[in-house]
Image (cartoon, rainbow, N blue to C red):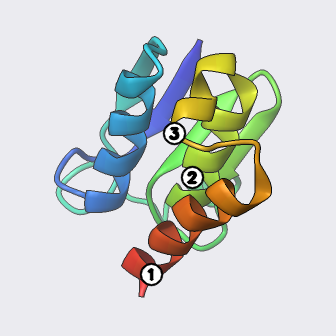
Amino acid sequence: MLKILGRTSSLNVRKVLWTCDELALPYDREDWGTGYASTHDPAFLALNPNALVPVILDEHGPLWESNTICRYLASRHDIGQALLPAEPRARAGVEQWMDWQAT
């Protein structure tokens, strides 16, 4: 089962939750970050040395950075091509907006 570490008040965590909901992926979520479990805890730092949410855990281990997580999840599931097309130009258009919003 996919696990998402992060608080729902984080826009970056909500982006990952939205992606999971769009892909109909089941997940468990744990509150980490401001007001919850500290991201400076050694256990969390072992997953993300930058001490930021979100982090996901799946059978392949931890992954952090919200845009990377969204791309990863969409790429792993056939239905994900609706969110992240395989065709290079269409995919670049999606990634362009993802990168733009990060700045």
Q: Position of residue 17 (x, y in %)?
A: 35, 36
29 lies above or below 68 = above
> At 53% across and 32% down in the image, what residue appears?
82
Give the crowd class for mark 3: few <14, some 14-19, many >=20 residues within 10 Å: some
Q: What numbered label is drawn on residue 100?
A: 1
In this figure, which residue is indicated by the disc labeled 2? Answer: 44
Q: CA distance from mark 2 to mark 1?
A: 28 Å
The image quarter in which residue 61 lies: top right
* Sooner in the amino-acid sequence: mark 3 or mark 2: 2
Placement of the C terminus among the 4 image quadrants: bottom left
Amino acid at circle 1: Trp
Q: What numbered label is drawn on residue 83?
A: 3
The image quarter in which residue 88 lies: bottom right
74 lies above or below 13 = above
> At 23% across and 63% down in the image, what residue appears?
34
Q: Position of residue 37 (x, y in %)?
A: 33, 49
Mark 3 or mark 2, which is nearer to you?
Answer: 3
- Per the image, label 3 sits on a secondary structure element best described as loop
Amino acid at circle 2: Phe
Give the crowd class for mark 1: few <14, some 14-19, many >=20 residues within 10 Å: few
Mark 2 or mark 1, which is nearer to you?
Answer: 1
